[in-house]
Protein backbone atom coordinates (compact mmCIF):
# COMPACT_ATOMS: atom_id res chain seq x y z
CA UNK A 1 0.00 0.00 0.00
CA UNK A 2 1.69 3.19 -1.13
CA UNK A 3 1.36 6.87 -0.19
CA UNK A 4 0.65 6.31 3.44
CA UNK A 5 0.59 3.32 5.72
CA UNK A 6 -1.77 4.90 8.22
CA UNK A 7 -4.51 2.86 9.83
CA UNK A 8 -7.63 2.60 7.69
CA UNK A 9 -10.99 3.86 8.97
CA UNK A 10 -12.99 1.36 10.95
CA UNK A 11 -15.68 -0.81 9.35
CA UNK A 12 -13.72 -1.79 6.25
CA UNK A 13 -15.37 -4.30 3.92
CA UNK A 14 -13.39 -7.56 3.67
CA UNK A 15 -13.59 -7.36 -0.13
CA UNK A 16 -11.89 -3.95 -0.12
CA UNK A 17 -8.39 -2.64 0.40
CA UNK A 18 -8.17 0.83 1.93
CA UNK A 19 -5.17 3.13 1.89
CA UNK A 20 -4.41 6.59 3.23
CA UNK A 21 -3.44 8.53 0.11
CA UNK A 22 -2.91 12.11 1.28
CA UNK A 23 -3.73 14.72 3.88
CA UNK A 24 -7.01 16.60 3.47
CA UNK A 25 -5.08 19.85 3.21
CA UNK A 26 -2.93 18.71 0.26
CA UNK A 27 -5.55 19.39 -2.42
CA UNK A 28 -7.52 22.55 -3.07
CA UNK A 29 -10.80 22.73 -5.00
CA UNK A 30 -10.22 22.09 -8.71
CA UNK A 31 -7.05 20.09 -8.16
CA UNK A 32 -6.18 16.48 -9.02
CA UNK A 33 -3.58 14.05 -7.72
CA UNK A 34 -2.55 10.59 -8.90
CA UNK A 35 -2.38 8.20 -5.96
CA UNK A 36 -2.02 4.45 -5.53
CA UNK A 37 -3.82 1.83 -3.45
CA UNK A 38 -3.11 -1.89 -3.68
CA UNK A 39 -0.94 -1.29 -6.79
CA UNK A 40 -3.86 0.43 -8.54
CA UNK A 41 -3.27 3.98 -9.79
CA UNK A 42 -6.17 6.26 -8.94
CA UNK A 43 -7.10 9.83 -9.85
CA UNK A 44 -8.06 11.72 -6.69
CA UNK A 45 -10.06 14.90 -7.29
CA UNK A 46 -11.33 17.66 -5.02
CA UNK A 47 -14.28 19.81 -6.08
CA UNK A 48 -16.48 22.02 -3.89
CA UNK A 49 -14.76 20.73 -0.78
CA UNK A 50 -15.50 17.09 -1.55
CA UNK A 51 -13.11 14.33 -2.63
CA UNK A 52 -13.83 11.71 -5.29
CA UNK A 53 -11.69 9.01 -6.87
CA UNK A 54 -11.78 7.28 -10.26
CA UNK A 55 -9.42 5.30 -12.48
CA UNK A 56 -6.36 7.28 -13.52
CA UNK A 57 -6.12 6.23 -17.18
CA UNK A 58 -8.42 7.10 -20.07
CA UNK A 59 -10.29 4.02 -21.30
CA UNK A 60 -9.46 4.92 -24.92
CA UNK A 61 -5.66 4.60 -25.22
CA UNK A 62 -4.65 4.75 -21.55
CA UNK A 63 -3.59 8.41 -21.44
CA UNK A 64 -2.87 9.72 -17.90
CA UNK A 65 -5.89 11.79 -16.89
CA UNK A 66 -3.80 13.73 -14.37
CA UNK A 67 -2.57 15.67 -17.43
CA UNK A 68 -6.13 16.35 -18.59
CA UNK A 69 -8.54 19.24 -18.12
CA UNK A 70 -10.72 19.26 -15.00
CA UNK A 71 -13.82 21.42 -15.41
CA UNK A 72 -16.58 21.19 -12.82
CA UNK A 73 -17.49 17.53 -12.32
CA UNK A 74 -15.66 15.96 -15.24
CA UNK A 75 -12.16 15.43 -16.53
CA UNK A 76 -11.34 15.50 -20.25
CA UNK A 77 -8.50 13.40 -21.66
CA UNK A 78 -5.71 15.67 -22.98
CA UNK A 79 -4.98 13.44 -25.97
CA UNK A 80 -8.25 12.62 -27.74
CA UNK A 81 -10.98 14.36 -25.77
CA UNK A 82 -12.83 11.57 -23.93
CA UNK A 83 -14.66 12.86 -20.83
CA UNK A 84 -15.44 11.14 -17.54
CA UNK A 85 -17.61 12.09 -14.59
CA UNK A 86 -15.27 12.34 -11.61
CA UNK A 87 -17.94 11.23 -9.15
CA UNK A 88 -19.30 8.17 -10.98
CA UNK A 89 -16.58 7.38 -13.53
CA UNK A 90 -19.21 7.39 -16.30
CA UNK A 91 -17.95 8.15 -19.80
CA UNK A 92 -19.74 11.30 -20.97
CA UNK A 93 -17.84 12.03 -24.18
CA UNK A 94 -15.92 9.84 -26.56
CA UNK A 95 -13.72 8.19 -27.93
CA UNK A 96 -13.36 5.13 -25.73
CA UNK A 97 -15.93 2.57 -24.73
CA UNK A 98 -15.64 1.89 -21.03
CA UNK A 99 -16.40 3.96 -17.96
CA UNK A 100 -13.71 4.46 -15.33
CA UNK A 101 -13.86 2.49 -12.09
CA UNK A 102 -14.98 4.70 -9.20
CA UNK A 103 -13.74 4.31 -5.67
CA UNK A 104 -15.04 5.05 -2.20
CA UNK A 105 -13.36 8.03 -0.51
CA UNK A 106 -13.47 8.81 3.19
CA UNK A 107 -11.94 11.76 5.06
CA UNK A 108 -11.17 11.12 8.71
CA UNK A 109 -8.96 13.06 11.13
CA UNK A 110 -7.59 15.21 8.32
CA UNK A 111 -6.55 12.22 6.25
CA UNK A 112 -7.98 11.03 2.93
CA UNK A 113 -8.60 7.30 2.47
CA UNK A 114 -9.49 5.49 -0.76
CA UNK A 115 -10.95 1.97 -0.88
CA UNK A 116 -10.63 -0.34 -3.89
CA UNK A 117 -12.55 -3.52 -4.56
CA UNK A 118 -10.66 -6.81 -4.80
CA UNK A 119 -13.19 -8.37 -7.14
CA UNK A 120 -14.70 -7.18 -10.41
CA UNK A 121 -18.46 -6.96 -10.69
CA UNK A 122 -20.06 -7.34 -14.12
CA UNK A 123 -22.97 -4.93 -14.35
CA UNK A 124 -24.65 -6.30 -17.47
CA UNK A 125 -25.84 -9.88 -17.89
CA UNK A 126 -26.78 -11.84 -20.95
CA UNK A 127 -30.42 -11.36 -21.85
CA UNK A 128 -32.73 -13.82 -23.43
CA UNK A 129 -36.09 -13.80 -25.10
CA UNK A 130 -36.87 -12.17 -28.44
CA UNK A 131 -39.84 -9.87 -28.77
CA UNK A 132 -38.64 -6.57 -30.17
CA UNK A 133 -35.84 -6.19 -32.77
CA UNK A 134 -33.41 -3.32 -33.26
CA UNK A 135 -31.39 -3.63 -36.47
CA UNK A 136 -28.11 -1.74 -36.72
CA UNK A 137 -26.74 -1.31 -40.26
CA UNK A 138 -23.02 -0.65 -40.08
CA UNK A 139 -20.13 -2.04 -38.07
CA UNK A 140 -18.46 1.11 -36.75
CA UNK A 141 -18.42 2.93 -33.40
CA UNK A 142 -21.95 4.31 -33.79
CA UNK A 143 -23.48 0.83 -34.07
CA UNK A 144 -21.31 -0.57 -31.30
CA UNK A 145 -22.08 2.25 -28.86
CA UNK A 146 -25.76 1.99 -29.75
CA UNK A 147 -25.78 -1.74 -28.98
CA UNK A 148 -23.86 -1.34 -25.74
CA UNK A 149 -26.03 1.56 -24.55
CA UNK A 150 -29.18 -0.44 -25.24
CA UNK A 151 -27.92 -3.31 -23.08
CA UNK A 152 -26.65 -0.97 -20.35
CA UNK A 153 -30.17 0.47 -20.17
CA UNK A 154 -31.69 -3.01 -19.80
CA UNK A 155 -33.10 -3.36 -23.28
CA UNK A 156 -34.05 -7.04 -23.46
CA UNK A 157 -35.01 -7.34 -27.11
CA UNK A 158 -33.01 -8.58 -30.05
CA UNK A 159 -30.03 -6.54 -31.32
CA UNK A 160 -28.62 -7.35 -34.76
CA UNK A 161 -25.52 -5.59 -36.12
CA UNK A 162 -24.92 -5.93 -39.87
CA UNK A 163 -21.51 -5.03 -41.32
CA UNK A 164 -19.88 -5.42 -44.72
CA UNK A 165 -16.53 -5.87 -42.96
CA UNK A 166 -14.91 -9.21 -42.30
CA UNK A 167 -14.14 -8.25 -38.70
CA UNK A 168 -16.12 -7.10 -35.67
CA UNK A 169 -15.86 -3.34 -35.01
CA UNK A 170 -12.24 -2.16 -35.07
CA UNK A 171 -10.32 0.98 -34.12
CA UNK A 172 -10.32 2.43 -37.64
CA UNK A 173 -8.36 5.64 -36.89
CA UNK A 174 -5.34 3.39 -36.40
CA UNK A 175 -5.53 2.03 -39.96
CA UNK A 176 -3.83 5.06 -41.48
CA UNK A 177 -1.43 5.58 -38.57
CA UNK A 178 -0.17 2.01 -37.97
CA UNK A 179 -0.96 -0.05 -41.05
CA UNK A 180 1.03 -3.10 -39.96
CA UNK A 181 -1.05 -3.96 -36.89
CA UNK A 182 -2.66 -7.37 -36.61
CA UNK A 183 -6.45 -7.46 -36.51
CA UNK A 184 -6.59 -8.77 -32.94
CA UNK A 185 -4.96 -5.57 -31.65
CA UNK A 186 -7.51 -3.42 -33.49
CA UNK A 187 -10.71 -5.01 -32.15
CA UNK A 188 -12.78 -2.63 -30.03
CA UNK A 189 -14.31 -5.62 -28.26
CA UNK A 190 -13.23 -9.28 -28.25
CA UNK A 191 -15.39 -11.58 -30.33
CA UNK A 192 -16.93 -13.29 -27.29
CA UNK A 193 -18.19 -9.90 -26.06
CA UNK A 194 -21.04 -10.01 -28.57
CA UNK A 195 -22.13 -13.46 -27.42
CA UNK A 196 -21.86 -12.44 -23.78
CA UNK A 197 -24.26 -9.53 -24.26
CA UNK A 198 -26.50 -11.23 -26.80
CA UNK A 199 -25.64 -8.97 -29.74
CA UNK A 200 -25.98 -10.77 -33.08
CA UNK A 201 -23.07 -9.76 -35.33
CA UNK A 202 -23.46 -10.49 -39.04
CA UNK A 203 -20.22 -9.84 -40.95
CA UNK A 204 -19.70 -9.62 -44.72
CA UNK A 205 -23.32 -8.61 -45.25
CA UNK A 206 -24.58 -5.37 -46.73
CA UNK A 207 -27.97 -3.67 -46.87
CA UNK A 208 -29.21 -3.11 -50.44
CA UNK A 209 -32.65 -1.64 -49.69
CA UNK A 210 -34.96 -0.52 -46.88
CA UNK A 211 -38.76 -0.68 -46.87
CA UNK A 212 -40.03 1.52 -43.99
CA UNK A 213 -43.67 0.59 -44.67
CA UNK A 214 -43.00 -3.11 -44.20
CA UNK A 215 -40.17 -2.40 -41.72
CA UNK A 216 -37.79 -4.66 -43.62
CA UNK A 217 -34.19 -4.50 -44.80
CA UNK A 218 -32.95 -6.53 -47.76
CA UNK A 219 -29.33 -7.72 -47.66
CA UNK A 220 -26.93 -8.48 -50.52
CA UNK A 221 -27.48 -12.22 -50.04
CA UNK A 222 -31.16 -11.73 -50.93
CA UNK A 223 -32.43 -12.27 -47.37
CA UNK A 224 -35.15 -10.03 -45.91
CA UNK A 225 -35.11 -8.99 -42.25
CA UNK A 226 -37.79 -7.35 -40.10
CA UNK A 227 -37.05 -4.58 -37.62
CA UNK A 228 -39.00 -2.62 -35.03
CA UNK A 229 -36.35 0.12 -34.95
CA UNK A 230 -33.52 0.74 -37.39
CA UNK A 231 -30.17 2.53 -37.11
CA UNK A 232 -28.44 3.70 -40.29
CA UNK A 233 -24.75 3.98 -39.42
CA UNK A 234 -23.09 2.85 -42.62
CA UNK A 235 -20.36 5.52 -42.60
CA UNK A 236 -18.62 6.65 -45.77
CA UNK A 237 -16.52 4.96 -48.41
CA UNK A 238 -13.25 6.23 -49.84
CA UNK A 239 -13.65 8.15 -53.08
CA UNK A 240 -11.81 6.28 -55.86
CA UNK A 241 -9.65 7.83 -58.54
CA UNK A 242 -11.43 8.23 -61.88
CA UNK A 243 -8.54 9.11 -64.20
CA UNK A 244 -7.34 6.80 -67.00
CA UNK A 245 -5.39 3.91 -65.51
CA UNK A 246 -7.18 3.93 -62.16
CA UNK A 247 -8.14 0.28 -62.72
CA UNK A 248 -4.50 -0.89 -62.83
CA UNK A 249 -3.11 -3.29 -60.26
CA UNK A 250 -1.39 -1.27 -57.54
CA UNK A 251 -3.99 1.51 -57.33
CA UNK A 252 -5.44 1.40 -53.83
CA UNK A 253 -7.78 3.11 -51.40
CA UNK A 254 -7.80 2.78 -47.61
CA UNK A 255 -11.12 1.65 -46.23
CA UNK A 256 -10.72 -1.66 -44.40
CA UNK A 257 -8.24 -3.63 -42.35
CA UNK A 258 -7.43 -5.67 -45.44
CA UNK A 259 -6.71 -2.46 -47.41
CA UNK A 260 -4.27 -1.25 -44.74
CA UNK A 261 -2.49 -4.59 -44.63
CA UNK A 262 -2.22 -4.70 -48.42
CA UNK A 263 -0.89 -1.15 -48.66
CA UNK A 264 1.74 -1.92 -46.05
CA UNK A 265 2.89 -5.14 -47.74
CA UNK A 266 2.91 -3.68 -51.26
CA UNK A 267 4.80 -0.51 -50.32
CA UNK A 268 7.68 -1.84 -48.21
CA UNK A 269 10.82 -1.23 -50.25
CA UNK A 270 8.76 0.05 -53.20
CA UNK A 271 7.93 3.45 -54.68
CA UNK A 272 4.63 4.94 -53.50
CA UNK A 273 2.55 7.91 -54.62
CA UNK A 274 -0.18 9.23 -52.33
CA UNK A 275 -2.86 11.28 -54.08
CA UNK A 276 -4.65 13.79 -51.85
CA UNK A 277 -3.03 15.80 -49.04
CA UNK A 278 -5.95 14.96 -46.74
CA UNK A 279 -5.68 13.77 -43.15
CA UNK A 280 -5.77 10.16 -44.37
CA UNK A 281 -3.32 10.85 -47.19
CA UNK A 282 -0.84 12.65 -44.95
CA UNK A 283 -1.02 9.96 -42.27
CA UNK A 284 -0.39 7.25 -44.87
CA UNK A 285 2.58 9.21 -46.29
CA UNK A 286 3.91 9.69 -42.76
CA UNK A 287 3.61 5.97 -42.03
CA UNK A 288 5.32 4.95 -45.28
CA UNK A 289 8.12 7.53 -45.04
CA UNK A 290 10.61 5.12 -43.46
CA UNK A 291 9.27 1.94 -45.08
CA UNK A 292 8.83 2.64 -48.80
CA UNK A 293 11.79 3.22 -51.14
CA UNK A 294 10.27 6.62 -51.91
CA UNK A 295 7.05 8.49 -51.13
CA UNK A 296 5.55 11.26 -53.26
CA UNK A 297 2.49 13.30 -52.24
CA UNK A 298 0.22 14.96 -54.83
CA UNK A 299 -2.10 17.69 -53.53
CA UNK A 300 -4.39 20.19 -55.24
CA UNK A 301 -3.72 23.05 -52.80
CA UNK A 302 -0.62 25.02 -51.85
CA UNK A 303 -0.26 23.18 -48.54
CA UNK A 304 -1.86 20.18 -46.82
CA UNK A 305 -4.84 20.99 -44.56
CA UNK A 306 -4.88 24.54 -45.91
CA UNK A 307 -8.66 24.93 -45.69
CA UNK A 308 -9.14 23.20 -42.35
CA UNK A 309 -6.04 24.12 -40.32
CA UNK A 310 -4.68 27.05 -42.32
CA UNK A 311 -1.56 27.57 -44.45
CA UNK A 312 0.85 28.04 -41.52
CA UNK A 313 0.11 24.66 -39.96
CA UNK A 314 -0.16 23.08 -43.41
CA UNK A 315 3.30 24.36 -44.32
CA UNK A 316 4.72 23.04 -41.04
CA UNK A 317 3.32 19.53 -41.60
CA UNK A 318 4.65 19.58 -45.16
CA UNK A 319 8.13 20.49 -43.88
CA UNK A 320 7.97 17.69 -41.31
CA UNK A 321 7.34 15.10 -44.00
CA UNK A 322 9.88 16.64 -46.37
CA UNK A 323 12.50 16.15 -43.66
CA UNK A 324 11.59 12.45 -43.85
CA UNK A 325 12.19 12.42 -47.62
CA UNK A 326 8.55 12.72 -48.73
CA UNK A 327 8.45 14.68 -52.01
CA UNK A 328 5.50 17.01 -52.53
CA UNK A 329 3.79 17.96 -55.78
CA UNK A 330 1.37 20.67 -54.65
CA UNK A 331 -1.10 22.71 -56.72
CA UNK A 332 -1.14 19.65 -58.92
CA UNK A 333 -3.21 16.58 -59.73
CA UNK A 334 -3.12 13.20 -61.45
CA UNK A 335 -4.34 13.13 -65.06
CA UNK A 336 -3.26 9.59 -65.92
CA UNK A 337 -1.81 6.46 -64.38
CA UNK A 338 0.32 4.47 -66.78
CA UNK A 339 1.06 0.79 -66.42
CA UNK A 340 2.98 -2.12 -67.79
CA UNK A 341 1.58 -5.66 -67.94
CA UNK A 342 -1.48 -4.45 -66.05
CA UNK A 343 0.54 -3.00 -63.16
CA UNK A 344 1.17 0.60 -62.18
CA UNK A 345 4.39 2.06 -63.55
CA UNK A 346 4.06 5.86 -63.34
CA UNK A 347 1.64 8.73 -62.76
CA UNK A 348 1.32 11.75 -65.04
CA UNK A 349 0.51 15.06 -63.33
CA UNK A 350 -1.27 18.18 -64.58
CA UNK A 351 2.01 20.04 -64.37
CA UNK A 352 3.52 17.61 -66.86
CA UNK A 353 5.67 15.86 -64.26
CA UNK A 354 5.90 12.08 -64.54
CA UNK A 355 6.50 10.19 -61.28
CA UNK A 356 7.64 6.58 -61.28
CA UNK A 357 5.80 4.41 -58.79
CA UNK A 358 4.79 0.87 -57.90
CA UNK A 359 1.75 1.79 -55.79
CA UNK A 360 -0.78 4.64 -55.89
CA UNK A 361 -2.89 5.33 -52.79
CA UNK A 362 -5.87 7.67 -53.08
CA UNK A 363 -6.93 9.87 -50.18
CA UNK A 364 -9.23 12.26 -52.02
CA UNK A 365 -12.30 12.33 -49.82
CA UNK A 366 -15.28 10.14 -49.00
CA UNK A 367 -18.82 9.41 -50.16
CA UNK A 368 -21.68 8.69 -47.70
CA UNK A 369 -22.90 5.10 -47.90
CA UNK A 370 -26.57 5.89 -48.45
CA UNK A 371 -27.27 4.55 -51.95
CA UNK A 372 -29.31 1.67 -50.52
CA UNK A 373 -31.86 4.21 -49.19
CA UNK A 374 -32.80 5.43 -52.65
CA UNK A 375 -36.32 3.95 -52.64
CA UNK A 376 -36.92 4.29 -48.90
CA UNK A 377 -38.12 7.93 -48.62
CA UNK A 378 -35.40 8.54 -45.99
CA UNK A 379 -34.25 12.11 -46.63
CA UNK A 380 -30.67 12.81 -47.66
CA UNK A 381 -28.95 16.10 -48.45
CA UNK A 382 -27.11 17.21 -51.60
CA UNK A 383 -24.04 15.19 -50.57
CA UNK A 384 -26.24 12.13 -49.94
CA UNK A 385 -25.76 12.37 -46.18
CA UNK A 386 -28.75 11.14 -44.16
CA UNK A 387 -30.59 14.06 -42.55
CA UNK A 388 -31.24 13.60 -38.83
CA UNK A 389 -32.37 15.82 -35.95
CA UNK A 390 -30.75 16.30 -32.54
CA UNK A 391 -32.39 13.10 -31.34
CA UNK A 392 -30.79 11.10 -34.19
CA UNK A 393 -34.20 10.66 -35.86
CA UNK A 394 -34.66 10.65 -39.62
CA UNK A 395 -37.90 11.82 -41.24
CA UNK A 396 -39.20 8.23 -41.04
CA UNK A 397 -40.60 6.97 -37.71
CA UNK A 398 -38.41 4.38 -35.94
CA UNK A 399 -35.53 4.96 -38.36
CA UNK A 400 -32.49 6.62 -36.78
CA UNK A 401 -29.14 7.74 -38.19
CA UNK A 402 -25.68 8.08 -36.65
CA UNK A 403 -22.06 8.74 -37.54
CA UNK A 404 -20.26 9.82 -40.70
CA UNK A 405 -23.21 9.03 -42.99
CA UNK A 406 -25.38 11.71 -41.36
CA UNK A 407 -25.98 15.45 -41.49
CA UNK A 408 -27.00 16.76 -38.07
CA UNK A 409 -27.53 20.06 -36.15
CA UNK A 410 -24.35 21.16 -34.32
CA UNK A 411 -25.11 22.85 -31.00
CA UNK A 412 -22.01 25.05 -30.83
CA UNK A 413 -22.84 26.51 -34.26
CA UNK A 414 -26.46 27.37 -33.38
CA UNK A 415 -27.72 24.10 -34.85
CA UNK A 416 -26.08 24.61 -38.23
CA UNK A 417 -26.46 21.34 -40.14
CA UNK A 418 -23.08 19.65 -40.61
CA UNK A 419 -21.54 16.40 -41.79
CA UNK A 420 -18.45 15.64 -39.70
CA UNK A 421 -16.42 12.44 -40.01
CA UNK A 422 -15.00 12.29 -36.48
CA UNK A 423 -14.65 9.05 -34.54
CA UNK A 424 -15.67 10.77 -31.32
CA UNK A 425 -18.90 12.14 -32.80
CA UNK A 426 -19.89 8.81 -34.32
CA UNK A 427 -19.53 7.22 -30.88
CA UNK A 428 -21.65 9.94 -29.27
CA UNK A 429 -24.28 9.59 -32.00
CA UNK A 430 -24.60 5.87 -31.30
CA UNK A 431 -25.20 6.43 -27.61
CA UNK A 432 -27.77 9.20 -28.18
CA UNK A 433 -29.58 7.11 -30.81
CA UNK A 434 -29.92 4.22 -28.38
CA UNK A 435 -31.29 6.43 -25.62
CA UNK A 436 -33.88 7.90 -27.96
CA UNK A 437 -34.87 4.45 -29.19
CA UNK A 438 -35.69 3.88 -25.53
CA UNK A 439 -37.74 7.11 -25.39
CA UNK A 440 -35.21 8.96 -23.19
CA UNK A 441 -35.42 12.23 -25.22
CA UNK A 442 -31.68 12.99 -25.13
CA UNK A 443 -30.17 15.53 -27.55
CA UNK A 444 -26.73 15.42 -29.17
CA UNK A 445 -24.66 18.27 -27.72
CA UNK A 446 -21.11 17.01 -28.28
CA UNK A 447 -18.28 19.36 -29.20
CA UNK A 448 -16.22 17.97 -32.11
CA UNK A 449 -12.75 16.73 -31.12
CA UNK A 450 -10.25 15.40 -33.63
CA UNK A 451 -6.59 14.42 -33.78
CA UNK A 452 -4.05 13.49 -36.43
CA UNK A 453 -0.62 11.91 -35.94
CA UNK A 454 2.31 12.64 -38.24
CA UNK A 455 5.75 11.16 -37.54
CA UNK A 456 4.85 10.70 -33.90
CA UNK A 457 3.59 14.27 -33.42
CA UNK A 458 -0.09 14.70 -32.60
CA UNK A 459 -2.11 17.74 -33.68
CA UNK A 460 -5.33 18.10 -31.68
CA UNK A 461 -8.40 20.03 -32.82
CA UNK A 462 -11.72 20.99 -31.30
CA UNK A 463 -14.75 22.97 -32.43
CA UNK A 464 -15.98 23.65 -35.95
CA UNK A 465 -13.87 26.12 -37.92
CA UNK A 466 -15.65 26.21 -41.28
CA UNK A 467 -15.77 29.80 -42.52
CA UNK A 468 -13.14 31.12 -40.10
CA UNK A 469 -11.64 34.45 -41.18
CA UNK A 470 -8.56 34.70 -38.98
CA UNK A 471 -6.14 32.54 -37.00
CA UNK A 472 -4.50 33.78 -33.79
CA UNK A 473 -1.42 31.84 -32.70
CA UNK A 474 0.17 31.35 -29.30
CA UNK A 475 3.66 29.88 -29.37
CA UNK A 476 5.40 29.43 -32.71
CA UNK A 477 4.27 27.15 -35.51
CA UNK A 478 7.78 26.98 -36.95
CA UNK A 479 9.02 25.67 -33.59
CA UNK A 480 6.25 23.05 -33.67
CA UNK A 481 4.78 24.11 -30.35
CA UNK A 482 1.65 26.22 -30.67
CA UNK A 483 -2.00 26.86 -29.92
CA UNK A 484 -4.14 28.21 -32.77
CA UNK A 485 -7.48 29.97 -32.29
CA UNK A 486 -9.82 30.08 -35.31
CA UNK A 487 -11.92 33.26 -35.36
CA UNK A 488 -15.30 33.93 -36.94
CA UNK A 489 -17.54 36.90 -36.07
CA UNK A 490 -15.11 37.93 -33.30
CA UNK A 491 -15.46 34.59 -31.54
CA UNK A 492 -13.26 31.51 -31.22
CA UNK A 493 -15.05 28.76 -33.16
CA UNK A 494 -12.25 26.17 -33.13
CA UNK A 495 -8.72 25.56 -31.86
CA UNK A 496 -5.76 23.39 -32.80
CA UNK A 497 -2.54 22.64 -30.96
CA UNK A 498 0.75 20.82 -31.04
CA UNK A 499 2.73 20.22 -27.83
CA UNK A 500 0.34 22.53 -25.96
CA UNK A 501 -1.68 20.09 -23.84
CA UNK A 502 -4.19 20.26 -22.28
CA UNK A 503 -5.24 23.54 -23.91
CA UNK A 504 -7.48 22.05 -26.61
CA UNK A 505 -9.12 19.69 -24.11
CA UNK A 506 -9.85 22.64 -21.82
CA UNK A 507 -11.25 24.70 -24.70
CA UNK A 508 -13.51 21.80 -25.65
CA UNK A 509 -14.88 21.75 -22.11
CA UNK A 510 -15.47 25.49 -22.16
CA UNK A 511 -17.38 25.17 -25.44
CA UNK A 512 -19.30 22.22 -24.05
CA UNK A 513 -20.41 24.38 -21.13
CA UNK A 514 -21.69 27.06 -23.51
CA UNK A 515 -18.96 29.60 -22.79
CA UNK A 516 -18.28 32.13 -25.54
CA UNK A 517 -14.55 32.72 -26.10
CA UNK A 518 -13.94 36.10 -27.68
CA UNK A 519 -11.31 37.21 -30.15
CA UNK A 520 -10.05 39.64 -27.50
CA UNK A 521 -9.41 36.76 -25.11
CA UNK A 522 -7.53 34.87 -27.81
CA UNK A 523 -5.42 37.96 -28.60
CA UNK A 524 -4.50 38.56 -24.97
CA UNK A 525 -1.04 37.59 -23.74
CA UNK A 526 -2.71 36.55 -20.50
CA UNK A 527 -4.24 33.11 -20.99
CA UNK A 528 -5.29 32.68 -17.37
CA UNK A 529 -8.91 32.47 -18.60
CA UNK A 530 -7.92 29.15 -20.16
CA UNK A 531 -7.28 27.77 -16.66
CA UNK A 532 -10.89 28.33 -15.54
Image (cartoon, grey):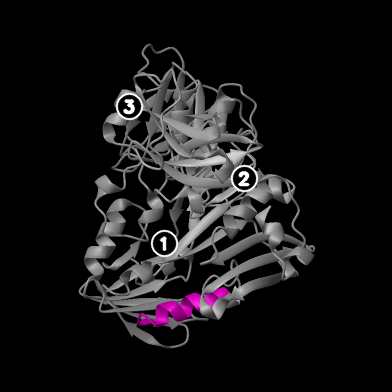
Please say if the residues under marks 1 and 3 sit with CB atoms less than 8 Å apart: no
Magenta segment main secondary structure:
helix
Magenta highlight on residue 321? yes
Frontmost of labels 2 and 3 is 2
Depth check: give the residue in front, 24 or 318: 24
Crowdedness of circle 3 by 10 Å Cα count: few (<14), some, many (20+)?
few
Crowdedness of circle 1 by 10 Å Cα count: few (<14), some, many (20+)?
some
Q: Point out residue 42 in the picture as x, y percentages from the top left corner.
A: 43, 40
Circle 2 sits in a helix, a strand or a loop, which is it? Answer: loop
For disc 1, the marked residue is: 240
Lower position in the chain sequence, tag 1 or tag 2: 2
Which residue occupies 44% across, 78% down?
A: 320
Q: Quadrant of residue 96?
A: top left
Circle 1 sits in a helix, a strand or a loop, which is it? Answer: loop
Which labelled disc corresponds to residue 140? none
Q: Point out residue 105 in the picture as x, y percentages from the top left corner.
A: 50, 30
Which labelled disc corresponds to residue 28? 2
For disc 3, the marked residue is: 118
Amino acid sequence: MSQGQGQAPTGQDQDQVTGMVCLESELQDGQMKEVEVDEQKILLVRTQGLYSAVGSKCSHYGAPLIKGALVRDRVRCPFHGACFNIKTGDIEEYPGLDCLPSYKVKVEDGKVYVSVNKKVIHLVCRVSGVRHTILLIGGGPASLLCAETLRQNRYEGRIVMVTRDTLPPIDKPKLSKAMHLESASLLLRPTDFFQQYDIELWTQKEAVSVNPVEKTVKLNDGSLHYYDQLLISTGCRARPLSCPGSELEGVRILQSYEDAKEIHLSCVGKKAVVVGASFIGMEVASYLADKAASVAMVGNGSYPFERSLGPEIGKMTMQMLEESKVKFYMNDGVVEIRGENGKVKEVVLKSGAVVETDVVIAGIGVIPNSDFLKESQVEVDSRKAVIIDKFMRTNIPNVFGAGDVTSFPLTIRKDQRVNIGHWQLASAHGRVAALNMLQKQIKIDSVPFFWTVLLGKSVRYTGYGEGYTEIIFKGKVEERKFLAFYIKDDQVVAAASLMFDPAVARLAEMMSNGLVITKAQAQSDDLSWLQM
